Image (cartoon, rainbow, N blue to C red):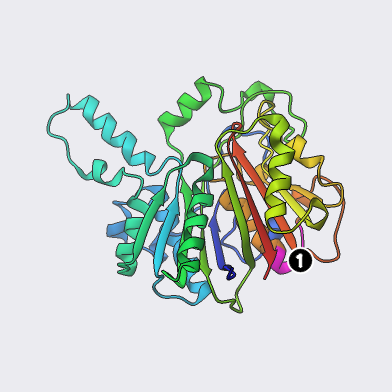
Amino acid sequence: MSAVYINSAACISVQDTLNENFSQNLKPENSVQILKAIEPNYKEFIPPAASRRMSKTVKMSTVASQYALKEAGIEKPDAIIVGTGMGCSQDSEKFLKNVLENNEEFLTPTYFIQSTHNTVSGQIALGLQCHGYNFTYVNTSSSLEFSMLDAKLQILDGEAEAVLVGSTDEQTDRTMELYKLNNTIKKEENFPVDYLNSTTDGVIWGEGSSFFVLGKEKAESSYAQLKNIQIINKLELDETQQFINDFLAKTQLTTQDIDAVILGFSGDVKSDVYYQKAMDLFSNSALLYYKNLSGEFNTASGFSTFMACHILKNQEIPEVMMINDLKKKEIKNILLYNHLGGNDHSLVLLEKA
């Protein structure tokens, strides 16, 4: 089977990840219910008239995709694939608010047109005048993984040589209020959050947009080789270790071959037990976590994939991500394990390019 490489990685998140030296300025957060993304000056990337009509997630994605394409040295990809959990939820809320306030009469269609989940991939394609394969995956926390799997198949089948793959999610006031009511978001009395040893329900909610260019040719800018992906909707706790072992066996690897494992500890006592179970397998690996930096959201794994790419390229692990103090001389294989609230488990295996 041919290789598929990640040739660029760009990320807008609650950290200053567009900055070249972002890894030196990573600030963990454990005492705020909702984390906002650090947004760039959109005027530098998007004409103001167009920007005014775009929701936050479209703007973040437009800029992140521009960074990713520039780094890969590509003007127009053969395909655009985007994963999102909530889509353009700001415009969805505006449309529904209009429906209620105007008694379902005299509604402007703009918010409705822009509220669909595939608005992001469509807007990027319009901007690039890209008429190739354009697809959006909406699979809660495994949306990015489905997108990458599709991109990999497109490349291996000879349908595309360079694919722009992204993940994006934004926050909205009403949804955040509902998340607080149903205890998805951690209560203020449970702060500060101990991500690794939490005894309470709920998470700190974040947002962000991550974009990557996948290609069949290794380039100077290549970060990693995308070795394998596996996704499962439901997993019993006692099946976790078997799930991981079977996945690694498909690439003729064992847990001893994994140099670093990035786990999605979110501070939610109910669902973090899966990561505890997975940790027991990797006594010889550097164990890392990242949601103390990004917050939890549907496509938070975009942030962990971005961090994994930089760890493989720079051969350095930021201290704020470390669970144990094991350091490898060379980091060759990184395993990423993520889920959201105990559902939609995904494993991604990256190898140094």
| Quarter where residue 332 is shown | bottom right
Residue 118, how many percent across, how many down? 34, 50
Q: Mark 1 points at which residue?
A: 315
> In this orientation, does residue 123 appear?
yes
The answer to whether residue 181 is left or right of residue 278 is left
Residue 242, how many percent across, how many down? 72, 40
Residue 266, how many percent across, how many down? 66, 36
Q: How crowded is mark 1: few (under 14 residues within 10 Å), some or many (20 or more)?
A: some
Magenta-colored span: 312-317
Q: Which residue is drawn at 59% across and 63% down?
A: 19
Question: If the image is split into quadrants, where does the C terminus sit?
Answer: bottom right
The answer to whether residue 340 is left or right of residue 193 is left
| Quarter where residue 346 is shown | top right
In this rendered view, identify the residue nearer to me: 246 or 321.
246
Q: Residue at x 55, y 36 (%)?
A: 233
| Quarter where residue 343 is shown | top right
The count of marks equals: 1
Residue 9, how many percent across, how many down? 56, 64
Instruction: Using the image, determine if residue 195 lies above or below residue 225.
Output: above
The answer to whether residue 85 is left or right of residue 31 is left
Q: Label 1: state its secondary structure.
A: loop
> In this orientation, does residue 273 appear?
no
344 in the magenta segment: no
Instruction: Using the image, determine if residue 73 lies above or below residue 322.
Output: below
Instruction: Using the image, determine if residue 260 lies above or below residue 100.
Output: below
In this rendered view, identify the residue nearer to me: 301 or 79.
79
Which three-letter amino acid code belongs to the residue tagged 1?
Answer: Gln
Question: If the image is split into quadrants, where does the N terminus sit?
Answer: bottom right
